[in-house]
């Protein structure tokens, strides 16, 4: 089936021009993102004495633990999607595939994590159609649920800003739009990936009811919220923040991750995620911290992924 897809792609799509355009756009985006973060980081390092910064190691360790927990929950959510395709695999093996496929995403070039996950899934005995559909569903529900959480937080975020954004938020019923988004997107998700079209394209479909799709969507939103709490603790380990800033930091964390997912050509959204996070944090955190926190948040994620890889290699 993979060979057939490649032949169709080669016959109908001018892959070389698209590859050149993709690589050029990716290069420009990465250069701009890295330059922005590096410039902000340079400005902040010169404006503050790093030796005077204190780190709350307990909060930092808790942030890493929550990041690891969110990765594990993501593995469980993928197992639910796999089961909905009709595949049955012990949770231990699903978690092993999920955790071992995380580090390869930092290899330059798009799709290494997906290719690694597909290979490990095949080695574990999963069918390729079920693997492809479940991975596509996993990425879709991750991006859509994160967008829903960010949308629900927009009114609170807008209330902290001045200018037209605050005025627009006051005249638009964003909470209602957010609730409708949460209720309707799982329905569309369930109908599309459980349709005969999915069966024809991927030779597989999801057998999910609407309550099941909605429950999975809400579970993913809770996972993003928990990840945001971990990010809040990371920020709190470096500077003074109040609980009232929790929604703002959850919003910054979630939007930056979505930006990294959209920039799929960048390895693990590297640079793009940090650039967006630095910009958003600069709206609420004092000068010395936005870029430092953005870089450190990547380090926390990498540590959590390496811990998951180490555990999964023994499963």
Image: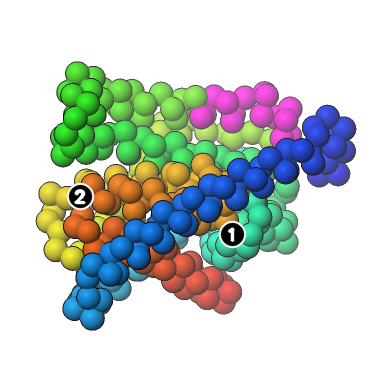
Q: Is residue 13 visible?
A: yes
Q: Which residue is mark 2?
A: 284
Q: Secondary structure at mark 1?
A: helix
Residue 82, percent from left and from top? 59, 46
Query: CA separation, marks 1 and 2?
Result: 31 Å
Q: Residue furthest bottom?
A: 51
Q: In the image, which residues are magenta?
A: 189-203
Q: Residue at x 40, y 33 (%)?
A: 214
Q: Position of residue 129 (x, y in %)?
A: 71, 42
Position of 7 with respect to 86 (left or right) is: right
Where in the figure is residue 104, as x and y percent of width and height? 61, 63
Q: Residue at position x 56%, y 77% from top?
A: 314
Residue 82 seen in render:
no
- Helix, strand, or loop for circle 2? loop
Between 314 and 259, which is closer to the camera in this rendering?
259
Q: Earlier in the sequence, mark 1 or mark 2?
A: 1
Return the residue nearer the eye: 98 or 61. Answer: 61
- For label 2, count other residues whose C-alpha is less than 10 Å away and answer few (under 14), some (14-19) or many (20+): some
Q: How is the image coloured?
A: rainbow
Residue that label 1 marks:
105
Which one is nearer the viewer's eye here, 24 or 250? 24
The quadrant where residue 37 appears:
bottom left
Label 1: how many residues lie within 10 Å, few (<14), some (14-19) or many (20+)?
A: many
Main SS of residues in magenta: helix
Residue plotted at (28% across, 69% down): 46
Q: Let me know if residue 79 is in the magenta part.
A: no
């Amino acid at each position: 089936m993979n060979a057939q897809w490649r032949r169709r792609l080669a016959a109908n799509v001018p892959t070389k021009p698209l590859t050149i355009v993709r690589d050029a756009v990716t290069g420009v985006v990465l250069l701009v993102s890295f330059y922005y973060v590096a410039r902000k980081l340079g400005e902040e390092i010169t404006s503050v004495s790093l030796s005077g910064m204190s780190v709350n190691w307990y909060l930092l360790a808790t942030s890493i633990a929550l990041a690891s927990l969110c990765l594990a929950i993501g593995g469980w959510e993928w197992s639910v999607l796999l089961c909905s395709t009709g595949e049955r695999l012990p949770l231990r093996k699903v978690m092993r595939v999920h955790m071992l496929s995380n580090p390869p995403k930092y290899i330059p070039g798009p799709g290494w994590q997906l290719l690694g996950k597909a290979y490990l899934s095949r080695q574990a005995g999963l069918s390729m159609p079920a693997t492809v559909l479940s991975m596509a569903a996993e990425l879709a529900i991750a991006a859509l649920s994160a967008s829903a959480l960010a949308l629900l937080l927009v009114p609170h975020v807008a209330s902290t800003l001045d200018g037209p954004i605050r005025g627009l938020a006051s005249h638009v019923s964003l909470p209602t739009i957010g609730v409708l988004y949460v209720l309707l997107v799982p329905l569309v998700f369930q109908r599309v990936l459980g349709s005969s079209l999915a069966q024809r394209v991927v030779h597989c479909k999801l057998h999910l009811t609407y309550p099941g799709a909605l429950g999975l969507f809400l579970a993913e939103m809770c996972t993003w919220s928990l990840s945001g709490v971990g990010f809040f603790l990371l920020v709190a380990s470096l500077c003074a923040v109040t609980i009232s800033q929790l929604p703002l930091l959850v919003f910054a964390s979630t939007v930056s991750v979505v930006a990294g997912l959209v920039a799929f050509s960048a390895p693990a959204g590297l640079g793009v995620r940090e650039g967006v996070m630095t910009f958003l944090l600069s709206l609420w955190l004092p000068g010395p911290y936005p870029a430092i926190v953005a870089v450190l948040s990547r380090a926390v994620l990498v540590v959590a992924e390496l811990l998951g890889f180490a555990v999964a290699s023994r499963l």
